[in-house]
């Protein structure tokens, strides 16, 4: 059975990549992609559970689709991390949802549907089957003509006390290196020149099988550099505890690895880091960050920063500020703590009042804006390479491009070809966006 499908995606880049792969598999099975949810026969909502706000958005969308079902008939399928975490609640509160599908069975959806819709229930989400049985899609659809996101590992074994990922994604499992190389090489032949390697803990990648040498993350990068024609290589998200000197040396030596690293710190207080079950101290993190920033080639860093974790005092918060000042991130994802049922921290007393969480969050947002602007301003006057991504939303006579250090730049002109690489002089900085000229 075939028809039209539509996918809504929330959360991380891994979800985005998996939604693209699901779309490609549906098309291969004979389905066509609907232009909107209003003309789809089956709608997938790929969900996120990392923060409460993400789940609240999904509940709102389920209410929307409940109303839509009164206007036209379609099958509603919830997949992703919220599907793993709240399967029973979703089915109870929204009987309009036809199926809730496991993270570990996304790759089978198109095949099951081709056999008959009723059989989709055979791959429903079950919390008691979360283990190393995760299966990677064979192919992932490129995000643009030049850029693709490639999952190389899934899950996490660190069990940070605030994090739901190990419970909804399972234990770490790495994808076969030869499959990764093969997929990237195929994408290169179709014009893709930039890839982002994905994993919840991407630099803990470690693939082994009997009779074959272990391939760690650095070795995988070397294989990609040697065996593919990829121009720019990015990766996310990195865990500081797995960032080796071997990896740092490769980044220093190999210009095809982009000089923009996402390195989540989470906090600057050793007491809070220990309660979070992060396996490094603030001093170790700062030394690692500065080692990267002091390489001969300039490296830009971004981070994840949390305030309001249980037990956080004014002094703990001050230490987070000190870490931000010491490292000087160009970008940071900032948020305040909210409990995730099933995590260790959910049993902690949530003793930081919400008004204090909001005040501290506002302070680090303001600080990060200042630091980010100051750091990026140092690049004004430089000539850089960038890839064209589209037309500026503010001015149709300006082109929007992304630099190798992951900054956006606009410059006068009309697009003649998307995803071309251009050489641009950075003339000014407005907010987070550079103003340039070819």
Image (tube, helix red, strand yellow):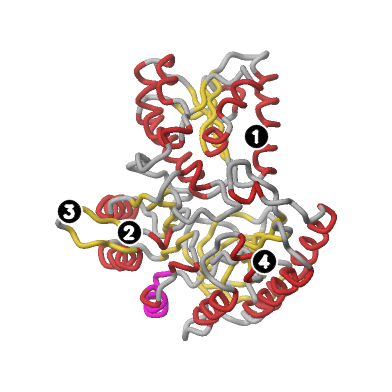
**Answer yes or no: do the residues labelled 3 and 1 have beta carbons within 8 Å?**
no
Image coords of residue 373 (percent x, y): 71, 73
Q: Residues within 10 Å of mark 4 (few under 14, many from 20)?
A: some
* Left or right: where 263 falls relative to 220: right
| Distance CA(mark 4)–CA(mark 1) | 31 Å
Element type where label 4 sits in the image: strand
Q: Is residue 253 left or right of residue 168?
A: left
Q: Position of residue 208 (x, y in %)?
A: 25, 56
Using the numbered discs, state the Cα–Cα distance from disc 4 to disc 2 in whole angstroms.
Answer: 37 Å
Q: Is residue 42 visible?
A: yes
Q: Please name the predominant secondary structure of the magenta segment in the image.
A: helix
The disc, 4 or 1, on the residue closer to the chain's N-terminal end is 1
Report, in whole angstroms, how far the alpha carbon at label 2 lies from the one at label 1.
Answer: 34 Å
Magenta residues, as a range? 247-257
Q: Which residue is mark 4?
A: 433
Pick the front one: 91 or 227: 91
Residue under label 3, please give it. Answer: 210
Q: Residues within 10 Å of mark 1 (few under 14, many from 20)?
A: many
How far from the left and from the top, in percent, is residue 125? 47, 29
């Amino acid at each position: 059975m075939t028809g039209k499908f539509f996918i809504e995606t929330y959360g991380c880049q891994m979800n985005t990549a998996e939604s693209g792969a699901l779309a490609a598999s549906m098309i291969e099975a004979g389905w066509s992609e609907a232009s909107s949810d209003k003309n789809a026969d089956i709608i997938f909502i790929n969900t996120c559970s990392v923060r409460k706000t993400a789940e609240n958005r999904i509940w709102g969308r389920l209410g929307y689709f409940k109303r839509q079902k009164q206007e036209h008939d379609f099958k509603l399928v919830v997949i992703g991390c919220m599907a793993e975490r709240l399967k029973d609640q979703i089915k109870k509160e929204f009987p309009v949802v036809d199926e809730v599908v496991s993270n570990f069975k996304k790759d089978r959806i198109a095949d099951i549907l081709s056999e008959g819709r009723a059989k989709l229930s055979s791959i429903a989400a079950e919390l008691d089957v979360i283990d190393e049985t995760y299966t990677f899609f064979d192919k992932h659809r490129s995000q643009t003509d030049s850029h693709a996101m490639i999952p190389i590992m899934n899950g996490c074994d660190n069990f940070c006390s605030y994090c739901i990922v190990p419970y909804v994604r399972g234990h770490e499992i790495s994808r076969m290196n030869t499959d990764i190389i093969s997929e990237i090489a195929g994408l290169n032949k179709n014009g893709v020149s930039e890839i982002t390697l994905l994993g919840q803990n991407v630099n803990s990648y470690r693939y082994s099988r009997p009779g074959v040498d272990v391939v760690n993350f650095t070795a995988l990068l070397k294989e990609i550099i040697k065996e593919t024609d990829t121009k720019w290589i990015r990766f996310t998200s990195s865990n500081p505890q797995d960032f080796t000197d071997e990896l740092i040396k490769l980044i220093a030596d190999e210009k095809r690895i982009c000089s923009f690293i996402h390195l989540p710190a989470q906090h600057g207080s050793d007491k809070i880091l220990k309660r979070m079950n992060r396996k490094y101290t603030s001093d170790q993190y700062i030394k690692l960050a500065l080692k990267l920033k002091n390489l001969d080639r300039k490296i830009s860093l971004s981070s994840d920063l949390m305030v309001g974790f249980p037990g956080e005092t004014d002094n703990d918060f001050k230490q987070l500020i000190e870490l931000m000042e010491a490292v000087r991130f160009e970008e940071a994802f900032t948020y305040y703590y909210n409990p995730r049922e099933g995590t260790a921290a959910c049993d902690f007393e949530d003793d930081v009042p919400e008004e204090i969480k909001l005040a501290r969050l506002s302070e680090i947002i303001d600080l990060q804006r200042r630091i980010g602007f100051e750091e990026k301003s140092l690049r004004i006057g430089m000539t850089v390479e960038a890839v064209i991504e589209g037309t500026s939303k503010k001015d149709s006579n300006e082109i929007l491009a992304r630099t190798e250090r992951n900054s956006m730049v606009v410059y006068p002109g009309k697009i003649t070809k998307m995803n071309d690489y251009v050489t641009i002089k950075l003339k000014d900085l407005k907010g987070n966006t550079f103003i340039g000229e070819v």
